[in-house]
Image: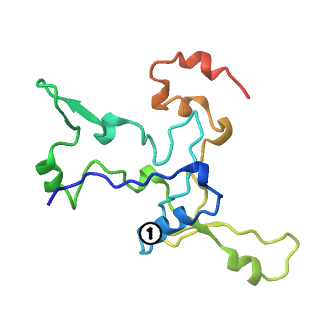
Amino acid sequence: MRIRAQIGMVLNLDKCIGCHTCSVTCKNVWTNRPGMEYAWFNNVETKPGIGYPKEWENQERWKGGWVRREDGSIVPRQGGKWALLMRIFANPNLPQIDDYYEPFTFDYDHLQSAPEMKAAPTARPRSLITGERMQKIEWGPNWEEILGGEFAKRSKDRNFDDVQKEIYGQFEN
């Protein structure tokens, strides 16, 4: 048996008609159980920004990519087959829930069941982890879309490592 480190899917976007069959199928396969509500499979990254999950392009943090040995061969930064096999059920280099966001829904039932009042009822966010109402949504997918947020946070994008960040920070749409 050969141990594989990753699973991937390549789609020809020239044939894409935007039906989302691929993303819906993938999401149904991987998120059909409690505890996976935070996972988004139809996520579009906008730049600049740290991405989703947070800093997903940071190869050092997540031990991604390859390392060249002295003999010229390459091995995954996470280790060889045996190292990966030893951590197959408890990989410490995977994002945690805080690297994604706290999954939430909205109190839609309150919109329909609220008593008559002067102001229209609102659907406040509710955590899917605790079930409690959330005072504020702190982060989520596409959080930095269209140059949103302060540049201090967006400048943590790994693609800025070799760019003069101060100059780019003055750029506006």
Q: Is residue 8 above or below residue 113?
A: above
The number of numbered discs placed on residues in the rendered structure image is: 1
Quadrant containing the N terminus in the rendered view: bottom left
How are the colours assigned in the image?
A: rainbow
Return the residue nearer the eye: 171 or 139. Answer: 171
Q: Position of residue 80 (x, y in %)?
A: 15, 44
Mark 1: few, some, or many residues within 10 Å (few <14, many ≥20)? some
Pointer 1: what residue?
Answer: 31
Front one among 4 and 125: 4
Q: Label 1, secondary structure: give it.
A: loop
Q: Is residue 151 left or right of residue 68?
A: right
In the displayed orientation, state which residue is furthest to the front: 15
The kind of residue tagged 1 is: Thr
In this image, 56 relative to 131: left or right? left
Residue at 71%, 78% (x, y): give it.
110
| Lateral position of residue 139 relative to residue 5, left or right | right
Measuring from the top left, give residue 171's x and y in whole percent.
68, 22
Q: Tell me where residue 20 appears, x and y as whole percent.
A: 59, 62
Q: Position of residue 100 (x, y in %)?
A: 46, 53
14 relative position to 161: left or right: right
At x 15% / y 55%, what residue is drawn?
Answer: 85
Q: Camera-side residue: 52 or 105?
A: 52
In the picture, the quarter occupied by the C terminus is: top right
Q: Residue furthest right?
A: 118
Which residue corresponds to the image point at 53% horizontal and 62% vertical from the top-left? Answer: 23
